[in-house]
Image (spheres, grey):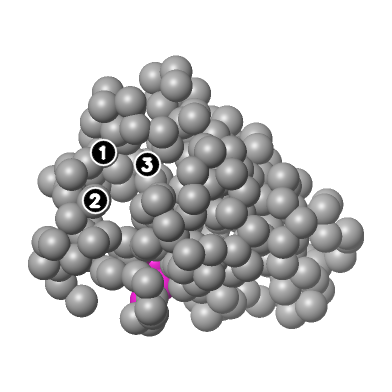
């Protein structure tokens, strides 16, 4: 979701800076990029370990999450091509799952902005024991869709997300955004979802359509 469908990474980063600076600490761009795509509890632990911020892991998660939810409700920053592709998949009755390390309150904001039934399943970071880069989130999504992982196609934007999807055996398309994503087995990269159709997803994932990277 974050960085793939909607450009919420700047919201997360802004909330991280505000939280750390309020505690008298220093947050850097490198720190922020280390958190991209991570399980929120992992991100919270990294903030606690690196800065003067105090509190429990869950308290930090809820503080960050509340700020990002507020910002997203004020403006839903769609990534190029994402909404059009979701609409086409829904109209074609292709079962789709939202697999995000954001927690349910933020995922619900996105779902509210889409026609009912766009997502057959929603897997959030607070619903899995092990988040990305572990395969668990994508294995859970495939199970909820009732299909084998290799019959799915994942679209990701971060190294942790791509690692999670490929570890689950899901053919993966990577659209790098905030951070660079290294080449990895089982994943192909493209510059944008703009102009990408449902059939293009199949061709891209199977190697029958040439992409950059």
Identify the residue at horizontal 64%, vertical 58% (top origin): 136
Q: Which residues are magenta?
A: 176-180
Residue at 72 percent of width and 51 percent of height? 128
The CA distance from mark 2 to mark 1 is: 10 Å
Using the numbered discs, state the Cα–Cα distance from disc 3 to disc 1 in whole angstroms. Answer: 15 Å
Nearest the eye: 187 or 61: 187
Which badge, 3 or 1, comes first in the chain's sequence?
3
Give residue 93's position: percent from left, percent from top.
33, 26
Residue 17 appearing in the image: no
Kindly identify which residue carries mark 3: 77
Within 10 Å of disc 2 (Cα), the crowding (few <14, some 14-19, many 20+) is many
Residue topped by disc 2? 201
- Which mark sits nearer the N-terminus, 2 or 1? 1
Residue 110 visible in the displayed image: yes
- Camera-side residue of 99 and 206: 206
Binning the other alpha carbons within 10 Å of mark 1 as few (below 14), some (14 to 19) or many (20 upward) gives some
Mark 1 element type: helix
Q: Looking at the image, do the residues carrying marks 2 and 1 touch, with CB atoms under 8 Å apart?
A: yes
Magenta part, dominant SS: loop
Left or right: residue 78 compared with residue 16? left
Front residue of 92 and 78: 92
Closest to the observer, 126 or 154: 154
Q: Against 178, is 87 above or below? A: above
Judging by the rendered image, the residue that carries numbered circle 1 is 85
Is residue 29 magenta-colored? no
**Neighbour tally class for label 3: few under 14, some 14-19, many 20 plus, Cα within 10 Å:** some
Q: Position of residue 147 (x, y in %)?
A: 49, 43
Assign the C terminus to one quadrant of the image: bottom left
The nearer-to-camera label among 2 and 3 is 2
Is residue 194 depicted above or below 190 in this figure? above
């Amino acid at each position: 979701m974050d960085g793939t469908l909607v450009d919420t990474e700047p919201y997360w980063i802004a909330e991280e800076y505000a939280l750390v600076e309020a505690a008298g600490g220093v947050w850097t761009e490198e720190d922020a990029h280390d958190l991209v795509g991570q399980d929120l509890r992992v991100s919270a632990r990294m903030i606690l370990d690196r800065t003067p911020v105090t509190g429990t892991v869950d308290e930090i998660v809820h503080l960050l999450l509340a700020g990002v939810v507020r910002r997203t409700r004020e403006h839903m920053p769609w990534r190029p091509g994402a909404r059009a592709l979701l609409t086409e998949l829904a109209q074609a009755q292709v079962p789709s799952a939202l697999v995000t390390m954001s927690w349910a309150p933020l995922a619900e904001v996105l779902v509210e902005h889409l026609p009912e039934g766009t997502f057959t399943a929603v897997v959030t970071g607070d619903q899995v024991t092990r988040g990305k880069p572990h395969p668990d989130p994508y294995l859970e999504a495939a199970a909820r869709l009732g299909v084998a992982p290799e019959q799915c196609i994942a679209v990701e934007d971060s190294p942790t997300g791509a690692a999670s999807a490929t570890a689950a055996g899901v053919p993966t398309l990577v659209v790098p955004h905030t951070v660079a994503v290294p080449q990895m087995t089982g994943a192909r990269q493209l510059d944008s979802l703009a102009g990408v159709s449902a059939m293009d997803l199949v061709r891209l994932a199977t190697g029958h359509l040439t992409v950059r990277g």
